[in-house]
Image (spheres, rainbow, N blue to C red):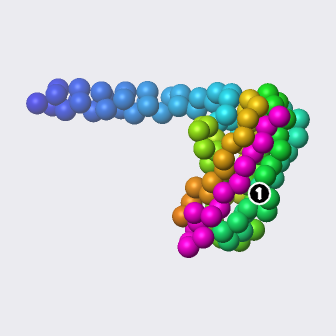
Amino acid sequence: MQRKIAYFLTLAALVLVLSACGGNDTKSGNNSSASEETYSQEVVIKASNWEFDQKEYALPKDTPVKLTLENLSGAHGIEVVGQDIAIRGNKSKVITLPAGTYEVRCSIMCGQGHSDMIAKIVVS
């Protein structure tokens, strides 16, 4: 019986040690933080209650751009529809998009005007 308990405790300790190792995998791409990548320019999207500061934002095609969300009032996030790009709160992300027009929506329910928080990113 004591042998089984010792075996179990040893196995549990081994699992804990192995799970503590690694897990800090940082890969480049759309999920990297802005400080790890180089970019050509910064585009700031300012969000206040139920509107963005511009209806349209221009970005250069196939060029890394630091996209920053700045909350002026309320809690907001953005998502670029059809892309794997989402930013919550006052954060940034370096992104690269091909030419096209992309819809940007608020991704945090922010009140009665939430559904009106739509803008465009035009990449050319």
Residue for point 30% across, 27% down: 11
Q: Is residue 118 magenta?
A: yes
Residue 35 visible from this viewpoint: no
Q: Is residue 48 magenta?
A: no
The residue lying toward the viewer, choosing from 1 and 119, is 119
- The answer to whether residue 83 is above or below residue 88 is above
The magenta-colored residue range is 110-124
Query: Dot 1: few (<14), some (14–19), or many (≥20) neighbours within 10 Å?
Result: few
The residue lying toward the viewer, choosing from 20 and 13, is 20
**Which amino acid type is shown beneath numbered disc 1?**
Lys
**Residue lying farthest front?**
101
**Residue lying farthest left?**
1
Task: Give the labeled residue for mark 1.
Answer: 55
Residue 58 visible from this viewpoint: yes
**Quarter of the rendering occupied by the C terminus:** top right
Q: How many marks?
A: 1
Q: Is residue 105 left or right of residue 71?
A: left
Residue for point 72% across, 49% down: 120
Residue 53 at x, y = what percent?
A: 79, 62
Residue for point 51% across, 29% down: 21
Residue 41 at x, y = what percent?
A: 88, 40
**Residue lying farthest right?**
40
**Quarter of the rendering occupied by the N terminus:** top left
Residue 10 at x, y = what percent?
A: 30, 28
Q: Is residue 2 left or right of residue 50?
A: left
The residue lying toward the viewer, choosing from 18 and 122, is 122
Residue for point 75% across, 68% down: 72
Residue 82 at x, y = what percent?
A: 59, 39
- The answer to whether residue 1 is above or below residue 72 is above
- The answer to whether residue 52 is above or below residue 41 is below
Q: Quadrant of residue 98?
A: top right
Q: Is mark 1 on a helix, strand or loop?
A: loop
